[in-house]
Image: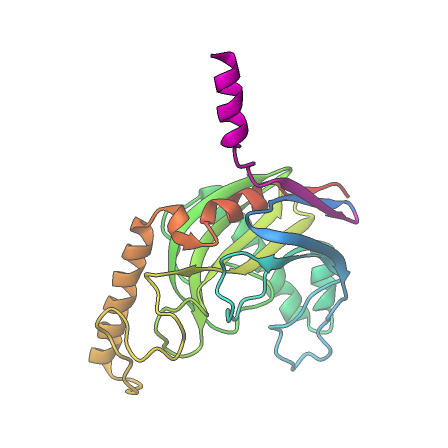
Amino acid sequence: MTALLFILAVACPQHAAPAKRTAAHDGVSLTFDEALAREVKAETAPAAPLEGADEKPDGVYPEHVAFTLVELKGAPADSFNEPVIRVCPVAAYLKAFSVSPAYVRDARRTLEELRGLIRRRPVALKGNVPALPFADGTEVFHARVKYLRFSGGAGVAFLTQAQQDDELLNSQHVSYSFRGLTDDGRFYVTADLPVGSQSLAATRDTPSHEGYSLLNRPGDRREARRYAAYVERVRLKLERLSPEQFSPGLNLYDDLLSSLEIRK
């Protein structure tokens, strides 16, 4: 009997679970599952300060630690979202806006609003989630809102689509987004990661989705109501899916952000 069990064990080997690996750089680390990405590249990203007070402030960053997910598995290949997690020192971020005292005040207020949101933990998010760099579009919906703790900090994760003009909700544009702060307020964490779902239109150029087609009627109130109803219909479908029905699975992203450690 023992020999038979041995033969069966050899003939039917168990598949090893995907390995966990750690990426670290300059006092910051995170752990990722190989089911999510082949590797994570950790590096120092250069500063991109505001050069003039009259410039758009939507691309401003301080020097910071960036983690890039390499060969992200299952994500839409043509996503507009970069698979990058950024850990930014708050003091340096405010200094990056220093040519404009007004933007410094706005940035400080934005981070205070984010801290308040994380503390209150509302189930439903209204308007754009407070974020830096300053948004250059409107978050047209929020779904799968989840508050995550990481070592020494916390943040909010959610699905959204940030846009300047009406679009179908699509896998190229929808992101798994995260905004977080360390408890001591010294570091800000941000990410807008690629994610797809069969409940979304495949691309931005898909002609119709869920029985709705975009009409070029700016200012048309009836059309605005139709679009809002379409967005809510898709949002509710996303809420009903399991985490595994997204690509990548949302739990892989949740675990990734929750593993963050900042020792600086």
> Is residue 189 found left or right of 163 in the rendered image?
right
Q: Is residue 89 visible in this depiction of the protein?
A: no
> Is residue 145 found left or right of 208 in the rendered image?
right
Q: Magenta segment, which residues?
A: 1-26
Q: Quadrant of the C terminus?
A: top right
Q: Is residue 186 visible in this depiction of the protein?
A: yes
The residue located at (55%, 39%) in the rendering is 149
Q: Is residue 181 magenta?
A: no
Q: Is residue 7 magenta?
A: yes
Residue 73, position in %: x, y?
A: 54, 56
The residue located at (57%, 68%) in the rendering is 134
Total labels drawn: 0
In the displayed orientation, state which residue is furthest to the top: 1
The residue located at (75%, 67%) in the rendering is 47
Q: For residue 152, what is the image quadrant?
A: top right
Q: For residue 98, what is the image quadrant?
A: bottom right
Residue 251, position in %: x, y?
A: 47, 44
> Is residue 245 found left or right of 56 in the rendered image?
left
